[in-house]
Amino acid sequence: ARNYLENVTVLYSGSHPVNDALDAVGRAIEMAKKVYIHDSLNIFRRNNDLFKTFCYNECQCTIECAVLPPRSVNGSVGLLLDYNKLSSTRNPNAMSDNMAMDRYFSHKIKRRNGEEHYARLKIRITQTDTRIDPLDFRFSKGRHEAIRRSNGEENWVTVNFIGYCYECRDTKNTGVILDVVEEHDVEAFSYIHNICDWEVECPSLIISYHPDKDKALYDKVKCVTNQIGGYQSQIAVAETFERQKNKNQYASAVLTKLNAKLSNPYNKAVSWKSICEESVGDVDSIPWVAVKPTLVVGIGMAHGLGNCGKTVVAASVCLDGGCMRLSHCCFLQQKSDIISTGNIKDIIKTSWKEFTAENEKCPERILIYRDGMSDGNFERADGEIANIRSAISEILSDNSATIPITYVICQSQHNIRMVPKDETQGNRRGQTVNVYSGTCLDHTVMEFGALSVTENERNNYDFLLTPQAGIKGTSKPIYFRVRINENSELDKKTLEECTYHMCWKYPTATKAVREVPAVKYAKRLANQVLSGLENFRYGGSTWFGKTFELINPQDADENGEIRPYIRMTTVDGEELRNMFNVVDLPFRHHLAA
């Protein structure tokens, strides 16, 4: 195990870690690709197994696959694709019938008698005459296992490996088996799907071990892995670890984050489930949200310093009724507290596309949690709502199309505190007695400067909520201001309940957090992107033959706005694409855990 770990680890010994982070991460990825994709340690060949991962093509389809390693040092690498299910596609119209059929085949083989066939690699085992697909086969804990399907359930069972064979089928109808060719009867073969035509996820996650809490190094590693490379990353700090009295607790916190980051569009994994009255079976559900397709979006902002600084607008969309699996998007604009027309439209369009690809149906209602808006900008929020309606009309190609919108402003910067009337009605931690987790105030008249909660509010929906159980100091509530609510079935009590339930769905905390996780992630991502913008200035950063550079247009777009973006080019200057969504990653959108 130590020898294996050494082959995928880069030990940095230089004196400029921030400047050299790009190179160090790049070398670690190259080492991982040699081990997993090229099987340089002969691990997969020796164990009669294939490396399983995910791939992504120009049609924007994410597919599970097994890597077919090269037969020589300079040989080509192939892919065996999952032909049964497609995890997600952001462009459903791009999936042609031919491509769907081609996904079945993995090889073009030539038999010793000269016959040529299109075939798929299969595995023979002693327990059954049925040939096993490589994606249903693995080597784990010193033995081979295969998936047994029975009564709608899938279980891994121990099997004995015999060898490989090739299942030849009709290219026009893959349901017709023409022949089964044994491995020894094959004179030559070529791969149908070459790895050069696909983006392959490898590694799934990068762990970076830092000596101390150097923010510059943290920001650089996060920018290199998440934005430039498109990889998930987890950072552990030696100084923090050594300072812990209970080191297992620190390790457990890191593992909790790793667990959250390994969720992807294919395995649809969640750290835990919440069940409510509306739940159907053992399905992760939030009250009201799970009843019918609901687009829940949290929006956060981060502002650069100075008049020439940029504003980063990030959004997290909940992909299902459990509100724990998220997809993210992030856009840049000139410094402003109000989201530009182009950015708010792109947020809705991107969130809509991700939700639809995940659920294979369009949302029927929208719930927006908007952070970072002060009382003085409330009227300008109506402009954002109008732009949301416009984006929906453009998505549906129907100017008269309407979908009910609930737009909630989340204010965390205020001076209101809620405390129990006496010590017996609260939660004591040390010398402090706080209100219980989930305490909600929505009816008593209160006046604190510009903030107010009154019975006579225009919609009577505003409320103060303290989801978290105070650990240190006095708990500070979030002030939720409902600017508009067009969802007739979403009354005040239901909105309060679903908001509180969401606060339990932050996968790196086993308790309720103060902010709605969709907003919390959006704010973290916005700050993360803002901290990494310097890496894209002054010529940008070069990564595996591609250059990423921040572009500040001089001319306004059709909305009269100047929208910065990241330009991706080859090292020769050929333009590949312009990324207005600066975290447009194919495999894992769960970035901020």
Image: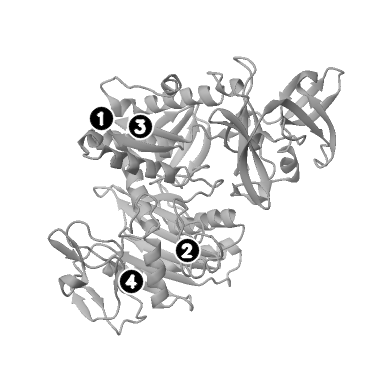
Amino acid type of the residue that numbered disc 1 sits on in the rendered structure: Pro
Question: Does 150 sit above or below residue 459?
Answer: above
Q: Which numbered disc flags the more N-terminal residue, 2 or 4? A: 2
Residue at mark 4 to residue at mark 3: CA–CA distance: 40 Å
Q: Are marks 2 and 4 in contact (CB under 8 Å)?
A: no
Which residue in the structure is indicated by mark 1? 211
The answer to which of 282 and 335 lies nearer the viewer is 282
Q: Which numbered disc flags the more N-terminal residue, 4 or 3? A: 3
Residue 401 image label:
none
Who's the residue at 49% across and 33% down the image?
Answer: 569
Amino acid type of the residue that numbered disc 2 sits on in the rendered structure: Ile
Residue 275 image label:
2
Q: Which numbered disc flags the more N-terminal residue, 2 or 1? A: 1
> Percent position (x, y) of residue 128?
74, 35
Amino acid type of the residue that numbered disc 3 sits on in the rendered structure: Ser
In the displayed orientation, state which residue is furthest to the top. Answer: 73
Which residue in the structure is indicated by mark 4? 481
Who's the residue at 51% across and 23% down the image?
Answer: 35
Q: Is residue 559 visible?
A: no
